[in-house]
Amino acid sequence: MDATYIGVDVSKDRLDVHVRPSGEAFVVSRDGKGLEELVERLCQLSPALVAVEATGGFETIVAAAIAGAALPLAVVNPAQIRHFAQAVGKRAKTDPVDAAVIAHFAEAVRPAPRPLPDEAARLLGELVGRRRQIIDMIVAERQREKRAANVRVRKSLARHIAVLEKELREIDADIDTLVRGSPVWRAKEDLLASVPGIGKTIARTLIAELPELGTLGRRQIASLAGLAPYTRQSGRWRGKSMIAGGRSSVRSVAFLAALVATRHNPPLKGFYQNLLHIGKPKMVALIAVARKLLTILNAILRDNRPWQNA
């Protein structure tokens, strides 16, 4: 018997559902009654996977209801669905069509089911995200302060920077309390921070935004972080390998960690210098260091063993 794959298109007021390979389709409201009906019908179908497209937060309650029923769930990136629709020639865009495309994507690609984070994990993710936003604002205000000629404007900018810096300290304190108060997260942070070049901020960002670290293979982790190179080749033409996709926040913090590691982590510093010595461009070498560092961190959490100096 063929496995059943289900696509759910989420809008503000309704959920369009498509079932493959049967082609069955139905609609429920996005409220308590509709979610009860959705879960009941999905349980009867015993699907191999239920795919829900991320839609700016509307999908959260839907995903929670599906996950709460112990059904295999994958919340998929809208960009992936859009590109898949183009690849299979689906130009029309309506809610029923979108649900059918999501189901087709689930059947063809079979993304790995991922459990929803618990309340504490969601809170940590929000705090880390908010910290990043505050830092971006501080950087922007400092740039404006440098360009401002008017004394009144400079004073206004200085006051705002002081407020943001105070808020940053409070956010950092909240994150510290949350991480150090959890035995699991505290152990993970200590393991990650044992690696030269990995500080508390980088460790906590990885804990919050790459919870799969330590549970997947090195290629999968590199792909999630957007650090896995892909080859561009057609016939005799060979383009340069590139990286793309993945979680931009994780990729950014991995680059930052790689920069620090090329100065303060002897093995990775030597690895970086060897790549430069054989003619690799600096950015290519830095990407390679970031990928190698992420592989090391993945192994450290997997094996539950801190960094060992050679």
Image (spheres, rainbow, N blue to C red):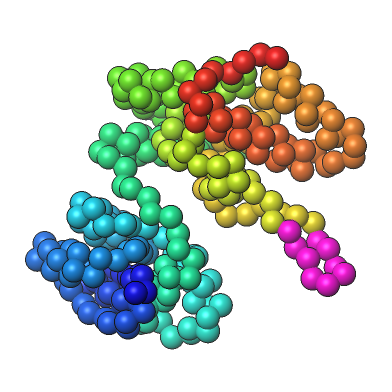
* Camera sees residue 154: no
Residue nearest the observer in this picture, 305 or 148: 305
Q: Quadrant of the C terminus?
A: top right
Instruction: Give percent across and percent down for residue 20.
Output: 35, 77
Residue range in magenta is 231-239
Q: With respect to residue 98, does 39 lie above or below? A: above
Q: Is residue 297 magenta?
A: no
Picture quarter with the N terminus: bottom left
Q: Quadrant of residue 74?
A: bottom left
Residue ID at (32%, 36%)? 121
Up-down relation of residue 255 to residue 233 (above or below): above
The residue positioned 45% from the left and 28% from the top of the image is 204
Q: Tell whether position 235 is magenta.
A: yes
Tell me where residue 300 sits by quadrant: top right
View extreme (left): residue: 33
Q: Nearer the viewer, residue 151 or 280?
A: 280
Tell me residue 257's x, y (percent).
61, 29
Q: Is residue 66 left or right of residue 230?
A: left
Q: Quadrant of residue 290?
A: top right
Q: Residue at x 83, y 63 (%)?
A: 238
Q: Residue furthest front?
A: 1
In the orientation shown, which residue stands out farthest toward the right? 278
At 66% across and 25% down in the image, what residue appears?
260
Note whether residue 306 is visible.
Answer: yes
Relative to 189, 70 lies left or right: left
Q: Nearer the viewer, residue 126 or 39?
A: 39
| Relative horizontal placement of residue 68, taking residue 222 as reference (left or right) | left
Q: How many marks?
A: 0
